Image (tube, rainbow, N blue to C red):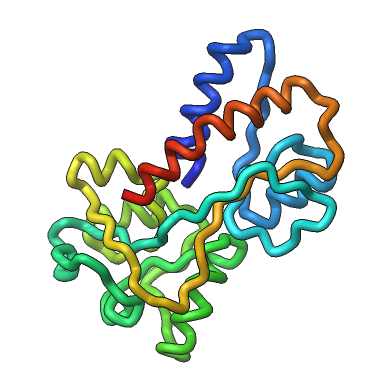
Amino acid sequence: SLSVTVLPDIMERFAARFPGINVTVTVTGSNAVTELVRGHTADIGFTFNPTVLQDLDVALVMDVPLGAALAPSHPLAKAKTLSLRECLDHPVAWPAQGLSLRTILDTVALRLKPQFRPAVECNSLRLMAAMARRGTCIAFQTRIGIEQDIAAGKLVFIPLSDKRLPRDRLMVVQRSGSHANPAADRLLALAREMLPRAAAVARK
């Protein structure tokens, strides 16, 4: 989700401020992000709910509400909030293993319906949002990455009301003690400047 709107905004601002610095971006799952940083392949990692933070410093952390994304024509689209049980009575798109959302949703869904089977399982939030736009299913994510669809009326975002759902936590991480790269430090400073604004939009 970060690669759809938030990271492009950060990269655009960074390129304008520091035109002589090249940035390489790899998009992958949450735990793979931390491994890339821990293994010296990446200087900074943007990730949700990493399971292991050993040898990493958390430069920024923010909680972002999780909700159901669905087409305006969907029978549940007029609700103010939805429970996961209500959503599971309809076709849903389910995050694949390796996505942080999978762990969050499984903690509640498997208690509600042990034999639950999603309409589709996918490792792409963009694809799941696209299916939700078509009315094929309900997708689950934060507002980050689907802001434009919500503003255009192509998607409705309804917060999930389940108290047992763990928080969806956005983190920016770097290797412990790695503060000797001026370019990475500048990118990190820009992320600290811009991410709180994105998170504020995601809470609306």
Image height of 9 relative to 114, above or below:
above
Residue depicted at x 70% and y 53%: 32
Image height of 86 relative to 148, above or below:
below
Instruction: Count all numbered tags in the image, as a single digit.
Output: 0
Q: Place residue 11 in its image quadrant.
A: top right
Residue 95 placed where, x, y %?
48, 64
Nearer to me, 171 or 36 = 171
Residue depicted at x 46% and y 78%: 164
> Left or right: 204 with respect to 123?
left
Residue depicted at x 36% and y 42%: 201
Residue depicted at x 25% and y 68%: 81
Nearer to me, 8 or 130 = 8
Residue 75 placed where, x, y %?
14, 69
Residue 77 placed where, x, y %?
17, 63
Q: Place residue 5 in its image quadrant.
A: top left
Image height of 118 relative to 42, above or below:
below
Residue 105 placed where, x, y %?
48, 72
Image height of 8 relative to 62, above or below:
above
